[in-house]
Image: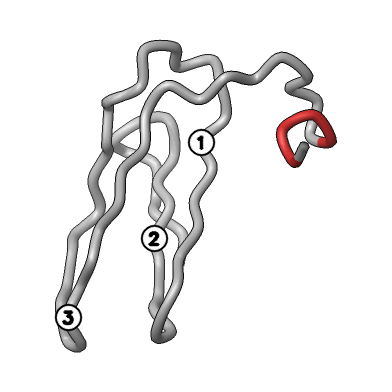
């Protein structure tokens, strides 16, 4: 339903990645590339303690946003 509201009426997910981190764990900026179709949206749900996430641009030279 959320995909349809966002304009992706026929969205069919093809991958799911679940990470479980301990308090104090860190992860650098990276890409998960398990999807078969990169034109589809990526949906992220984070549960648990608060965290700061970074999001990079389309090019490696793009500045990451927090």
17 up-or-down from 23: above or below: above
50 up-or-down from 46: above or below: below
Tag 3 and tag 1, C-beta contact below 8 Å: no
38 up-or-down from 29: above or below: above
Residue 10's spot in the image, x, y percent? 71, 14
Image quadrant of residue 38? Answer: top left
Residue 27's spot in the image, x, y percent? 18, 64
Task: Please tell me how crowded label 1 is: few (under 14), some (14-19), or many (20+) other residues with Cα within 10 Å.
Answer: few
Which of the pair 45/55 is nearer the observer?
45
As helix, strand or loop, the secondary structure at mark 1 comes to loop
Q: Nearer the viewer, mark 1 or mark 2?
A: 1
Which of the pair 62/40 is nearer the observer?
40
User: Which residue is under mark 1?
Assistant: 42
User: Which residue is under mark 2?
Assistant: 54
62 up-or-down from 34: above or below: below
Q: Nearer the viewer, mark 3 or mark 2?
A: 3
Image quadrant of residue 40? Answer: top right
The residue under the point 37% across, 28% down is 15
Circle number at residue 60: none
Which of the pair 16/27 is nearer the observer?
16
The residue under the point 39% across, 60% down is 54
Circle number at residue 22: 3
Viewport quadrant of the N terminus: top right
The residue under the point 39% across, 42% down is 62
């Amino acid at each position: 339903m959320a995909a349809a509201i966002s304009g992706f009426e026929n969205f069919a997910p093809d991958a799911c990645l679940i990470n479980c981190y301990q308090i104090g764990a860190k992860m650098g900026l990276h890409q998960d590339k398990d999807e078969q179709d990169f034109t589809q949206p990526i949906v992220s749900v984070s549960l648990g303690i608060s965290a700061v996430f970074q999001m990079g641009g389309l090019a490696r030279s793009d500045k990451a946003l927090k």
